[in-house]
Amino acid sequence: MNIERLRIYDKCLRSNKKHTAKELMDKINLGKVDKFISSRNTINQDLRYIESKLNGETKLIKERQGYYTVYYYEDKNFSLFKTPLNEDETEKLKLAAAFLSEFKGLPQSRWVEETIDSLTEKNTIKSKEITEVKNIMSFDFEKAEKFGEESTKMVFEIYNHIKNEEVLEINYQPFFDKQRKLKLHPYHIRLYNKRWFLLGYDEISQIKEYIAPLDRIVGKIKVLKNLKYIKSRIDSWEEHFEDFVGVTKSEDEEVEIRFKAYGSTWHYINTKPIHSTQRKIKKNNGNTEPVNVNDYGIFSINIIPNNELKSILRSYGDKIDIISPESFKL
């Protein structure tokens, strides 16, 4: 049902005046918020829909007055738009707020900041709760332009498993290998390069931060209620991802990587940084930008190297050259 049409019904049903079906129809049509209603059947369907949304908090009274039936809420203080969110709806709103918070500070994102501020000011969501959600789930918008349909359906289910500290039995199908079972203590879900990844401790392989792409999980996820959940050794996943790109944190130390970028590739990387530590380096002639397609500029990033970083840099082909360190090879 159109939300504005629902608001008109709600206002009428909680007012002191008791409305007939014909009066409700006239109010809806006068509001011009939806298609013109000419049938009593439509009004009856709408009222049945409203009745299904009351959740026992009040009753929709149908009272006979002479030749007509009038409709009103038993509790005049009730409103569909004052009903508090249930637990499931609140969790989804927290997820949405955490998702939106990733846009804060970006150009044309003032509306996002105002929305989140409004939610926190009205105590719908606390700032601490957004932080808690982001410690369970993170989003990498440098690459995540579209979500995989099937794996995205699992995200909220897995989010709840993490929040409830439940151990999971998962059937995992790697590429070019046999299917295997995981006894996973799930810790974090991350969106990177258009794919969702689940990170957690696998009891079978004893890998502390096992990484399972959601699109490689087959069948239903089973909760192992007889196993005690082992908490993550990582306190802040937001901080965990700060010093590398992607999902995989290698055992290597953080290094400063300097590289040349030629022509328009320099401008592209400048406007879409590879990592938060990226900075421009002045050349000997004092310039930072290339002056033509054959010229280059130099960037520096302080980062833990991994395969995801190499994949990003390789994607630029011969338009970049690694300067240092010598140990870092593509």
Image: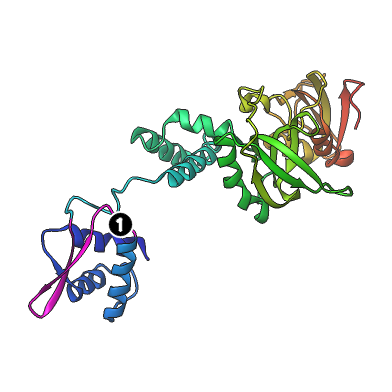
Q: From the viewer's perspective, is 178 left or right of 242? A: right
In the rendered image, the vertical position of residue 207 relative to residue 3, given as above or below: above
Q: Specify the quadrant of the image occupied by residue 6.
A: bottom left
Instruction: For residue 206, say whether it is visible.
Output: yes
Query: Label 1 crowding class (10 Å Cα cut-off): few <14, some 14-19, many 20+?
Result: some
Residue 108 is situated, as x and y percent measured from the top left of the image, at 51, 42
Q: Look at 55% across and 35% down and name the residue there.
A: 163
Quadrant in which the N terminus is drawn: bottom left
Amino acid on which the number 1 mark rests in the picture: Leu
In the rendered image, the vertical position of residue 211 relative to residue 195, given as above or below: above
The residue nearer to you, when weighing 2 against 154, is 154
Q: Which residue is mark 1?
A: 54
Disc 1 element = loop
314 falls in the magenta region: no
In the rendered image, the vertical position of residue 173 relative to residue 278, given as above or below: below
In the rendered image, the vertical position of residue 21 relative to residue 60, given as above or below: below
Q: Specify the quadrant of the image occupied by residue 285.
A: top right
The boundaries of the magenta stretch are 53-74
Instruction: For residue 148, say whether it is visible.
Output: no
Q: Look at 82% across and 22% down and name the residue there.
A: 251
The residue nearer to you, when weighing 58 against 38, is 58
